[in-house]
Amino acid sequence: MKLLHFFLLTPFLFFLKCSSTANFSTQIASPSLILPLKTQQITSGFSAPNKLPFTHNVTLTVSLSVGTPPQNVTMVLDTGSELSWLHSNSTRIKQPIFNPNRSLSYRPVSCSEPTCTTRTQDFSIPASCDSKNFCHAVISYADASSSEGNLAMDTFTIGGSNFTGTIFGSMDSGFSSDSDEDEKTTGLMGMNRGSLSFVSQMGFKKFSYCISSLDFSGILLFGESNFTWILPLNYTPLVEISLPLPYFDRVAYTIKLEGIKVSNKLLPIPESVFIPDHTGAGQTMVDSGTQFTFLLGPAYTALRSEFLNQTMRSLKVLEDQDFVFQGAMDLCYRVPVNQTWLPKLPSVSLVFRGAEITVSGERLLYRVPGEIRGKDSIHCFTFGNSELLAVEAYIIGHHHQQNVWVEYDLEKSRIGFAQVRCDIASQRFGFFR
């Protein structure tokens, strides 16, 4: 059985005031909600419902409570989804659920309420009425996973703060492509720009996270993040369009990818490759609900070719055309099982308008669990071809956001990036292993 990883979030509230020491100072103008983020190995399948047709090996989760009296739940943190939802079917024996019958503050939403008639306009499948006149929602994903139930309201408690009347999906049915994948979670926390997303309902104008690449705590923060040790943040504006297009997600965190570099060498990719077409296909999204990064064909081909060219002398390529990791990663290498280190790898930089993310070292290759060829393990390049997944978009996954402070500034419609040792940042808040 594969060893998988997931992140656990244990919330509490910080009221940070201006303070300083020799090594660390903070200054926040208003209360912020800060949560420690931990990595942990588990021995069963575990992932968010797959928006791409493969199983994630790492998923971000947040722990909180819902209802009156409170029921503890664990939700996947997903900046690529809008509606937060919880499993509420009591027939789920092994999986955790939220039981609406035990909550005095639970209230279903009727299909005549504005919440159902107007605020669900960004759903891929329109909301409808069920036999009890409640607002019915269906959430589906690219791998045929789905979740179905009614919109409802209840009190969400996180870090000691109550958010009453929070709208979410109380899901009583669904299908998962992996029967074990949701054994550890109760649902999903949608964090995109839609009006029904969790962050929109909370009212925070900013949120940030910092994912550690090591077995240390990371950070999830709602509110201001004016910390001197992470400045300066380099910001890139969010791309917005006024008219709906069939393949453009208007509530996603879309930014403008302008180029790709390998070891500081800018690849000769035409600018038009990074621009969405007249249907909206080709947008670049920052998505915490996807593990790796996926590029459209022409950009992926150029990156694959240059990375292969720069690693030919230091790594042995896997010569197996039938092996494509997770259906999209076809550049893999053979590394001796007893070799505990990788050779120096060329860095890969994603160049955005006003900002840049550089991926280096071990984040560039992922050891495929259970794949052994002779005396070699298999390591695959962590960038994939999105077109092999029938996805017409660039997706920046959370694996390549490790050791990067990522700030979502909703008020100014921009995302900020800064290179940070997230394990050290966590220790400054008193978060440890």
Image: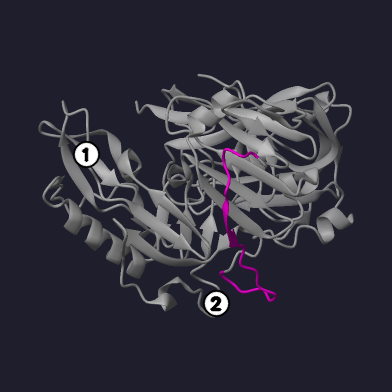
Provide residue 311's location: percent of width, then percent of height: 18, 51
Provide residue 168's location: percent of width, then percent of height: 75, 43
Is disc 2 placed on a helix, strand or loop? loop
Whether residue 250 is visible: yes
Q: Say which of 245 and 242 sits in front.
A: 242
State the separation of the CA atoms marked 1 and 2: 38 Å
Residue at mark 1: 378
Whether residue 90 is visible: no
At 80% from the left and 50% from the top, the residue drawn is 135
Residue at mark 2: 279
- Read off the magenta span: 227-247
Is disc 1 placed on a helix, strand or loop? strand
**Residue lying at the far bottom of the rendered structure:** 278
Q: In which quadrant of the rendered image does the N terminus lie? A: top left
Q: Main secondary structure of the magenta part?
A: loop
Badge 1: how crowded within 10 Å, few (<14), some, or many (20+)? many
The magenta stretch spans residue 95: no
* 287 up-or-down from 226: above or below: below
Give the amino acid at mark 2. Thr
At 55% from the left and 38% from the top, the residue drawn is 210
